[in-house]
Image (cartoon, grey):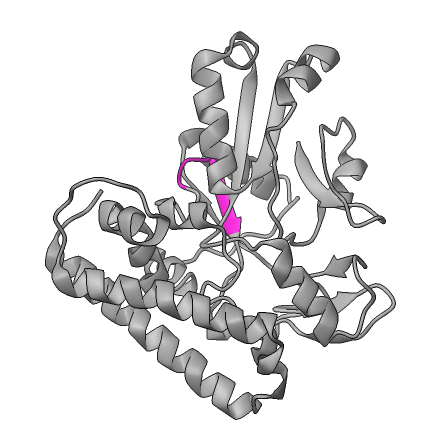
Amino acid sequence: MSSFQNEDNEVITEIFTAGDEVRKTRGSIYRQVSLLNGLNDKLEAGNYRKLLVIGLPCHIAGLKKLQAVNENFRCMEIITIALFCKQTKTEEFSRFARIVLKAKPNKRIHYRGKGWPGRIRVDGGRSLPFNNIRLSLMWPSFAFTPSYCFACTDPLGQVADISVGDPWLKKYSGERSGGSLFVANTSKGLGIIKEMADDDRIFVQPETAENALVSQNISYIRFKTRNLKARAVSLCGLAGKFEAHSNYLRTIRWVKTNKKMVECLYRTRIVIYIPELLLKVYGRATRLVFRRIADAGEKSGKTP
């Protein structure tokens, strides 16, 4: 079971029974996906005994909760694959991408592809490198990121049997084959990977745990896995008493302010007229602030 965008730009979730059908789910969807909606009805209608679920860490975490309380899920063999995810995006991200790509409203966007890291393109429109600064600035600033992403503590999908994502390391830059970095989180996941490698269905090149963390940006990982209480109260507006390092709170409030400011630049389309060099400098400054967030989290010692 996984999700994909159809020709009408709708996000569709299906349970596939043929391997060839799964190919339609290739590619990234930087949109909000309700993967588990209606899943119980689908399982009852299909009488499935085994299920492979591919989703974000929050999807897999929700599935685990369902397994604990739902009879249909408890009696099934379920294999889970999570995609590395530090944030998703609202539809405003896609709407602005269409503006930059000079495409009509609601045209389907292909967020990745054409090599690695690839290009973002739209049906009947232009294409740009995926890391083009006018679009990529939304990621370090958390612009158009749903509030619930700030409550996430599992950016690497450790809740799943296998987690997978892009290998953001210099040695893989420009690779045309589109290889992925994957991590076996359970013995079941490790067994699946070994079986596929032994059958030559995948090519496996070992990587170090340190490089795996570096490839996903250690600052982001620390931001998502530490000081959850302070983050939830400051960014999500949740009520409650907590203790946290004052430097961490000051920095995290800056994240919230910066997010709103960058969103304003996009909503008013001012960002289109700002020179790329200035946007790159601002993006680099934002990443430096995230390092401060990580350092503050380490010093405070307050983990979830």
Q: Residue at x 76, y 26 (%)?
A: 17
- Measured as percent of width and height from the top left, residue 41 is found at 68, 16
Residue at (44, 45) in percent of width and height? 148
The quarter of the picture where the N terminus appears is top right
Q: Is residue 30 visible?
A: no
283 on left or right of 89: left
Q: Which of 186 and 64 lies nearest the eye of the viewer? A: 64
- Which corner quadrant of the image does residue 297 belong to? bottom left
Q: How many marks?
A: 0
**Looking at the figure, which quarter contains the C terminus?**
top left
**Magenta stretch holds residue 165:** no
Quarter of the view holding residue 48: top right
Residues in magenta, as a range: 158-164
Q: Is residue 206 visible?
A: yes
The image quarter in which residue 97 lies:
bottom right
The residue depicted at 70 percent of the width and 19 percent of the height is 42
Q: Is residue 242 above or below residue 36?
A: below
In the image, is 229 to the left or to the right of 106? left
Note whether 164 is above or below 212 in the view shown.
above
Q: Position of residue 222 (x, y in %)?
A: 29, 57
Q: At 61% across and 29% down in the image, what residue appears? A: 52
- Where residue 171 sits: x, y (%)? 49, 73
The picture places residue 164, in percent across and down from the top left corner, at 52, 49
Left/right placement of residue 149 relative to residue 224 reads right
